[in-house]
Image (cartoon, rainbow, N blue to C red):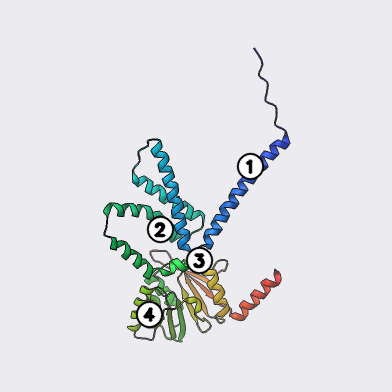
């Protein structure tokens, strides 16, 4: 009976080379993932969302074909949920906004449900039209329609003076609830709301016309608005434009004026205070007191000197 010989030890250089190869492979995979995420971030949000849906659908169909070859009988509901799960994972990994992730999770199940109900064709056209006139900004700048709750509006009013007239600007005023409340409840020299989505603009414009005090609502891009004359600027947008909006505010707003963001803080900047709001979404008002354009310029020059 022959004795089994122990396996010859792998030379240390070979072991090191294998470990380095595995590490390099993981690094390349991570780099490719980062490149994909960066590429999707630079795409228009709607195109990135469409690409994620295409990839998720292709993956689900490939798995369906494998199940068919293996004679595994599964209901269409399972495949719709699988497609939604893949889309949510891709959207999360590539850093898409939360509301896009919700849309990805609902798209395939909703399509399956509509296919079974078989609604008339005009339903689809009407739904697409309603999205376009209410959430046009969501496609262009990843800013969906967020409505300020009455509790958040009351909290905002607590921050505004009751005796001294102010100049108030609401960037993305939606249906006009905030700008009309400020114009009605507080003295203002200017009470301006900006909105670009057609249906919210029309609603807020009608509400402003019925306001007992002077309230102006314009269909205008917020990036074209000069903020140098504003005492208080209010925004309820999304996390995406906050860094750019902060740069605009610090470059234009005067010292002592207030920039107030509902729910979405400025990344990397500590607010003067944060006021929690007791509403269904658990929102909060992040209050920033501006140092003025001169202070912003000094900070920029200091940063440039350090770099």
Q: Quadrant of the N terminus?
A: top right
Residue at image mark 2: 103
- Toward the viewer: 164 or 225? 225
* Label 2: which secondary element: helix
Residue 91 pos. (x, y %): 47, 55
Cα gap from disc 2 to disc 3, whole angstroms: 17 Å
Q: Residues within 10 Å of mark 3 (few under 14, many from 20)?
A: some
* Label 4: which secondary element: helix
Residue at image mark 1: 22
Cα gap from disc 4 to disc 1, whole angstroms: 62 Å
Q: Which mark is residue 274?
A: none
Q: Quadrant of the C terminus?
A: bottom right
Q: Is residue 296 visible?
A: yes
Residue at image point 46% right, 73% down: 235
Depicted 287 relative to depicted 47: above or below: below
Left or right of residue 5: residue 94: left
Image marks 2 and 4: residues in contact by CB distance under 8 Å: no
Image marks 1 and 3: residues in contact by CB distance under 8 Å: no
Left or right of residue 17: residue 53: left
Which of marks 4 and 3 precedes in the sequence?
A: 4
* Label 3: which secondary element: loop
Report how many numbered discs are placed on residues in the image: 4
Residue at image mark 4: 180
Which of marks 3 and 1 precedes in the sequence?
A: 1
Residue at image point 29% right, 60% down: 121
Q: Which mark is residue 240?
A: 3
Q: Residues within 10 Å of mark 2 (few under 14, many from 20)?
A: some
Which of marks 1 and 2 precedes in the sequence?
A: 1
């Amino acid at each position: 009976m022959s004795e089994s010989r122990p396996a010859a030890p792998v030379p240390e250089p070979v072991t090191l080379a294998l470990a380095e190869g595995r590490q390099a492979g993981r690094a390349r995979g991570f780099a490719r993932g980062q490149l994909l995420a960066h590429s999707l971030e630079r795409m228009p949000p709607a195109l990135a969302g469409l690409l994620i849906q295409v990839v998720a659908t292709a993956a689900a169909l490939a798995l369906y074909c494998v199940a068919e070859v293996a004679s595994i009988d599964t209901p269409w509901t399972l495949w719709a949920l699988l497609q939604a799960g893949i889309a949510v994972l891709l959207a999360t990994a590539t850093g898409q906004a939360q509301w896009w992730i919700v849309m990805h999770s609902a798209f395939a199940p909703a399509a399956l449900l509509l296919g079974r109900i078989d609604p008339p064709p005009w339903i689809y056209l009407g739904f697409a039209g309603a999205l376009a006139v209410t959430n046009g900004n969501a496609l262009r700048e990843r800013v969906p329609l967020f409505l300020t709750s009455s509790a958040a509006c009351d909290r905002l009013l607590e921050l505004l003076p009751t005796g001294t007239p102010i100049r108030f600007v609401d960037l993305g005023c939606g249906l006009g609830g905030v700008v009309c409340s400020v114009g009605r409840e507080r003295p203002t020299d200017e009470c301006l709301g900006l909105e670009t989505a057609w249906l919210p603009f029309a609603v807020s414009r009608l509400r402003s016309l019925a306001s007992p005090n002077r309230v102006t609502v314009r269909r205008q891009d917020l990036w074209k608005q000069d903020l140098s004359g504003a005492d208080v600027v209010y925004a309820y947008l999304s996390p995406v434009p906050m860094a750019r909006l902060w740069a605009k505010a610090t470059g234009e707003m005067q010292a002592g004026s207030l920039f107030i963001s509902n729910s979405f803080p400025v990344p990397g900047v500590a607010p003067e205070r944060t006021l929690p709001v007791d509403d269904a979404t658990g929102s909060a008002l992040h209050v920033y007191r501006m140092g003025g354009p001169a202070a912003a310029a000094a900070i920029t020059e200091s940063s440039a000197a350090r770099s």
